[in-house]
Structure formats: structure tokens, C-alpha cells
Image (cartoon, helix red, strand yellow):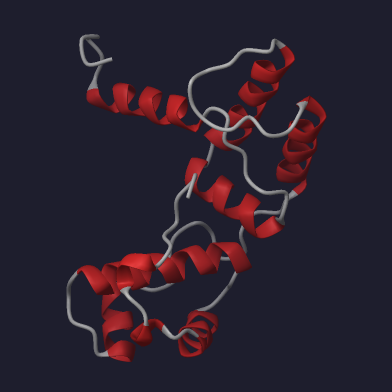
Amino acid sequence: LIELKLPKKDRMYIQNLHSRFGTLPEPKASNLRVFRSVLQQQAVQHLELEIVIRTHELSPSMGTYDGDVSYVESLLDMLQRMPPLKAGNASLIDGHWLMQRTNLGKGIALGKLKSWLHRLQVERDLETKEDIEELLCSLHWNEENYHDWPSLQFPE
């Protein structure tokens, strides 16, 4: 792809799309929310392409290819019936809010914690900063290595 005369944005889109082939979200609301949040408008397109790949027995180089056509169709149906996130796709909190509550300074740990909270916000469809604060109080973030914290991405 580097040799193609494509704008970087288009090249990155194609690389990201290709790298996700064969990868499906788990059939749980929390996983589908993350999938939709990360892929946004391409979430439905991704599942439709997965149906085509399985229907025509294609085998791109990436992914595990678990699930048959009917399984992917059921994921697509679940995704299309899922209501939008109550608070939208953006994080409810910013770094300043998080610094005030954790005494973390600017840096990687703060960013990773914010990303983890954003993922949990999406997974659980949280609506308010108060929900995030309650969640923050329940996490043992200060006892764990921030390199191990999940972020809002698909695939994981």
C-alpha cells in the first residue's frame, strides 16, 4: 500500500479495514457497543463484508474466522437494533476532571486511565460524570500497572 498514490487518510482506512477482517465482536451488548463506538459508520459495513467473506468462502490473511454466515447475520441484527449510546460517543470526562479526582499528573498513566474509563463508559452505556466517578471509585487503578489497562479499541 505504500507504493499507491493515495492520501495517507485513505491508506490508513484501507489498512485498518483489512486488519480487522475475520475479527468479530462477542455477541454481548457491551462488546457490540465498543465495536460500534470504534468503527462508527463502518461497523455495519464491517459485518456486511464478513458475511460476503463467509458466503464466498474467501480467506483473507487476518483474523480467526470463527462463526458462520448466520452467526454474523445475528450480530448484524443485534447491532442494528441496539439503541445509540445515552451519552453519545465522546468521553464524559476530560483530563482535568480526572486529575482532580486521582491526583495523577499529566502523563501516560492519566491518559491510559481516561481511555479505560471511556471504554467502560461505552461498555456500560453510562450517562453522567457521576456514573464515571462512581466507577472510578470502584476500580483498583492505583494498585495496577497502567500498561495493563484496556482502552477503547477493536479488536482488543
Q: Quadrant of residue 9?
A: top left
Residue 37 to residue 136: above or below: above
Direction from residue 70 to residue 84 in the image, left or right: left
Furthest residue toward left: 106
Q: Which percent across, then down, holds residue 98?
A: 32, 81
Residue at (70% x, 57% y) in the render: 29
Residue at (35% x, 73% y) in the render: 113
User: How many labels, in total?
Assistant: 0
Of 63 and 121, nearer the camera is 63
Of 126 and 138, nearer the camera is 138
Direction from residue 1 to residue 56 in the image, left or right: right
Residue at (23% x, 25% y) in the render: 8
Q: Which percent across, then down, holds residue 6?
A: 26, 14
Q: Which percent across, then down, holds residue 129?
A: 48, 80
Direction from residue 8 to residue 36 in the image, left or right: right
Of 100 and 110, nearer the camera is 110
Quadrant of the snapshot with the N terminus: top left
Residue 124 to residue 130: above or below: above
Residue at (80% x, 38% y) in the render: 74
Q: Quadrant of residue 86?
A: bottom right
Q: Which percent across, then down, holds residue 78?
A: 77, 45
Direction from residue 105 to residue 90 in the image, left or right: right
